[in-house]
Image (cartoon, rainbow, N blue to C red):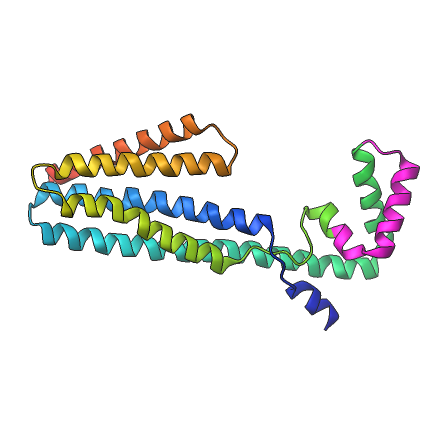
Amino acid sequence: MVEKAIIEKKKPSMADKLNTLRAGVLGSNDGILTVVGVLFSVAVATTDKFTIFIAGLADLLACAFSMASGEYASVSTQRDTEKAAVITEQKLLKTDFARELDQVVSFYQKKGVSEQTSRGIALDLMRKKPLETIISVKYNLKLGSYLNPWNAAFSSLFSAAAGGIFPLAAMTLSPDSFKWQATILAVCFSVSLTGYLSAKLGNGLAKIAIFRNLIVGIVTMIIHYCIGILL
């Protein structure tokens, strides 16, 4: 019962928050690109705004739920793997404590600490909090802090839907004479925003991320416009 309580314990973590934000940014980007792809293909084939709207809305919903289910499955798998690692280490601490201790000693030695000092640190930590120590050393995990698949799923669901609304609204609400320009501008703005946010989350270069997303967005529009012409 004690072991189960340790495994199921939940604590808010920065990793979980960043993972939720990551899912949101990716969901938004996918929502934008998949919806504009359908809109461009259908809008070239027909000028009926209701048909275009229904096609875009159907794709928006499909994309949102697909992204959400994918995130849920992916993060759930990672969470299960982390829990399995904790169970494994609990057993090893009982059956092979000496080897577990040596791995902690080795961990500190690789950081430049002398063998004697490393062993002293390891012995102290393994006496006070053995499971937390070995999980941190071997897996770089914080005991009890697991990624939440529901947070990632809902973040991806709502952001994909929100991202897809930009091109859908631009194409269906703009005057016929300006709908293409409005949709292109909406897509360029929205993918630039997701590129900027992804760069900030990953500590990357914002200009490169924005440019990369713009290129992908423009290529997506060109490809689906051509598909619509062929149809």
Q: Is residue 154 left or right of residue 104?
A: left
- In this rendering, is residue 83 above or below 34? below
The answer to whether residue 226 is seen in the rendering is no
* Chief secondary structure of the magenta portion: helix
The answer to whether residue 6 is seen in the rendering is yes
- In this rendering, is residue 36 above or below 96? above
Query: Residue at (75%, 60%) from the top-left corner?
Result: 90
Instruction: Say which of 92 and 41 sits in front.
Output: 41
Residue 80, given in percent of the width and then of the height, sits at 58, 59
Residue 210, given in percent of the width and then of the height, sits at 38, 30
Query: Residue at (9%, 43%) from the top-left corner?
Result: 45
- In this rendering, is residue 96 above or below 115? below
Q: Which residues are magenta?
A: 112-134
Instruction: Say which of 49 and 85 sits in front.
Output: 49
Residue 107, given in percent of the width and then of the height, sits at 79, 40
* The residue positioned farthest toward the right in the image shown: 116
Residue 53, given in percent of the width and then of the height, sits at 16, 52
Instruction: Say which of 150 and 13 sits in front.
Output: 13
- Magenta span contains residue 132: yes
Q: Is residue 171 left or right of residue 81?
A: left
Q: Is residue 174 left or right of residue 12?
A: left
Query: Residue at (73%, 67%) from the top-left corner?
Result: 3
- Magenta span contains residue 84: no
Query: Residue at (70%, 64%) from the top-left corner?
Result: 6
- In this rendering, is residue 207 above or below 225? above
